[in-house]
Every structure is written in structure tokens, then in C-alpha cells.
Image (cartoon, grey):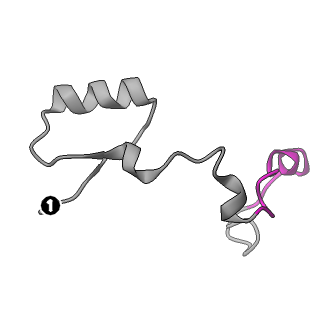
């Protein structure tokens, strides 16, 4: 969004963009596999929240019929 001009960023904040020019293949050590965030559609809210807590994630994915 910054590159395309949709979002302004302070010059000091640009130093935090260390990942900006890296290839996705180089980010494997920082990015968790998507499989870690998939739960079954019949998972209870309690279990989903526990999964989020233990895996330290803000988002879980649910796929209907696999």
C-alpha cells in the first residue's frame, strides 16, 4: 500500500520495512505455515480460542467440506 501511494509512512517507520524487498521464499523462517491456522468447521468456540491462544495467532481458517 505504501509503494502504490495508498498509505503514507513516516521516514522513521521505513526502517521497520526490512522485509519489504525480500522474496516470499526467503520468509519461511518468519511466516508460519497456513496449516497451523486451519480448524474444522465443527470446532467449538472454546476450542478455537484455546487454539488461538496456544498458537499465538489472531486468525483461524475454516474450510467447509475440506
Q: Position of residue 59 (x, y in %)?
A: 38, 43
Is residue 14 located in the magenta-colored stretch of the structure?
yes
| Disc 1 secondary structure class | loop
Image quarter in which the C terminus is found: bottom left
Q: Quadrant of residue 64?
A: bottom left
In screen coordinates, is 64 left or right of 22?
A: left
Measuring 67% from the left and 67% from the top, which residue is drawn there? 1
- Up-down: is 36 above or below 11? above
The residue that mark 1 highlights is 64
Left or right: where 29 falls relative to 11: left
The residue located at (35%, 31%) in the rendering is 52
Q: Main secondary structure of the magenta part?
A: loop
Q: Along the horizontal axis of the image, is 58 left or right of 20?
A: left
Is residue 45 inside the magenta stretch?
no
- The residue that appears at 76% across and 54% down in the rendered structure is 19
Where does the magenta region start and end?
A: 8-22
Front-most of residues 36 and 1: 36
User: Residue 61, image x and y in percent?
Assistant: 30, 51
Amino acid at each position: 500500500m505504501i509503494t502504490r501511494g495508498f498509505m503514507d509512512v513516516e521516514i522513521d517507520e521505513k526502517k521497520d520495512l526490512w522485509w519489504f524487498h525480500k522474496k516470499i521464499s526467503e520468509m519461511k523462517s518468519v511466516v508460519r505455515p497456513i496449516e497451523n491456522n486451519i480448524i474444522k468447521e465443527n470446532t467449538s468456540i472454546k476450542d478455537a480460542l484455546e487454539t488461538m491462544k496456544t498458537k499465538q495467532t489472531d486468525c483461524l481458517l475454516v474450510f467447509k467440506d475440506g
